Amino acid sequence: MNNPILVTGASGNVGREVVQNLLAMGQVVRATAVDAQDAQYIPGGAEIVLFDYADPATYHAAFDGVEKVFLLRPPAISDVAHTIKPAVTYAVAAGVKHIVFLSLIGAENNHFVPHYKIEKMLETVGMAYTFLRAGFFMQNLNTTHRADIVKENDIFIPAGQGRTAFIDTRDIGAVAAKVLTEPGHENTAYALTGHETLTYGEVADIFSQVLGREIQYSNPSLPNFAWRMRQRGYPWSYIGVMSGIYLTTRLGLAEKVTGDTAVLLARPPISMRQYVQDYASVWQEHKK
């Protein structure tokens, strides 16, 4: 029987897509959840185990018998040395041979984000790695930023007039499943973007056209953005990482379009317009 492939963060935007793609390929999938409620969001067909980077008692159930791992950093975790590294060290000792890490586009040159530290750590622990350096997720617009679009008709993101090469998490999931199940991707990094570069003003125009109502891009300052996110209960560590990502967009560092996604999937990446059409119902205000 095939060894299970471990997918961490399996209830999230990307993790769910990785699980679904692997299951569709006939792979045995072991998926991690933080608790029973979290497990409800994991696609059916996967073996579910409870896993916590901060609790070594959960490592055995996750890594036993696994040779390949999809590694996703939980948004709240920024202390790589005391959280991610112990789990990875255990994984190596348990026999894991290849880790595919969901990183951030440009992480190799951005020493301020946790992704950079994780990449450097994975390069030294003694197993094969693949870095999927992804651009900004389209799906952040139907999760983190959904409330502003639904209630305020506003994309409340502090990205200035910088351009972004967005990517759909469905494409990331398809790429991850591919590199986890075929040889030739070891010790490699891929920069994953869509095929177009857009300002958030242009994104707002696409939303307006598809949803049939005016959506604006208010372009808040970084402090105003941070304060609103804090009022919604997000931890400062998470807000700091998000602010850093949007700062790179303001500086024009998120606009590079690469061909890696199209080459790996042998098809064009999903466009922003297609994404908004597919998720249109998410941004409709549901009346009670």
Image (cartoon, helix red, strand yellow):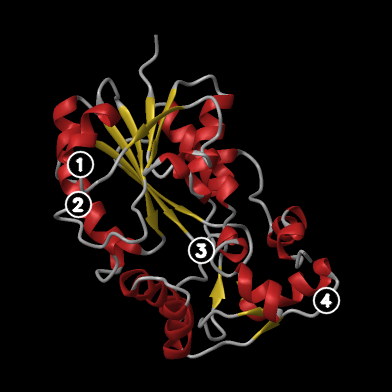
Q: Mark 1 points at which residue?
A: 87
What kind of element bears circle 4?
A: loop
Distance between mark 2 and mark 4 Cα atoms? 44 Å
Query: In which quadrant of the rendered image does the N terminus lie?
Result: top left
Amino acid under disc 4 = Arg
What kind of element bears circle 1?
A: helix
Distance between mark 3 and mark 1 Cα atoms? 26 Å
Seen in the picture, residue 112 relative to 118 is either above or below; the reply is below
Of the numbered discs 3 and 4, the one sitting upstream in the chain is 3
Marks 1 and 2: CB-CB under 8 Å? yes
Of the numbered discs 3 and 2, the one sitting upstream in the chain is 2
Q: Name the residue under label 3.
A: 136
Camera-near label (3 vs 2) is 2
Amino acid under disc 2 = Thr
Of the numbered discs 3 and 1, the one sitting upstream in the chain is 1
Q: Which mark is residue 213?
A: 4
* Residue 156, horizontal then vertical, whole percent: 58, 80
What kind of element bears circle 3?
A: loop
| Residue at horizontal 53 percent and vertical 89 percent from the top | 220
* Residue 137, horizontal then vertical, whole percent: 54, 60
| Residue at horizontal 28 percent and vertical 59 percent from the top | 77
Residue neighbourhood size for the residue with mark 4, other residues' Cα within 10 Å, grouped as few (<14), some (14–19), many (≥20): few
Q: Name the residue under label 2.
A: 83
Seen in the picture, residue 27 relative to 98 is either above or below; the reply is above
Distance between mark 3 and mark 4 Cα atoms? 24 Å
Extreme-right residue of the structure: 212
Extreme-top residue of the structure: 1
Of the numbered discs 1 and 4, the one sitting upstream in the chain is 1
Seen in the picture, residue 30 relative to 276 is either above or below; the reply is above
State which quadrant residue 242 falls in. Answer: bottom left
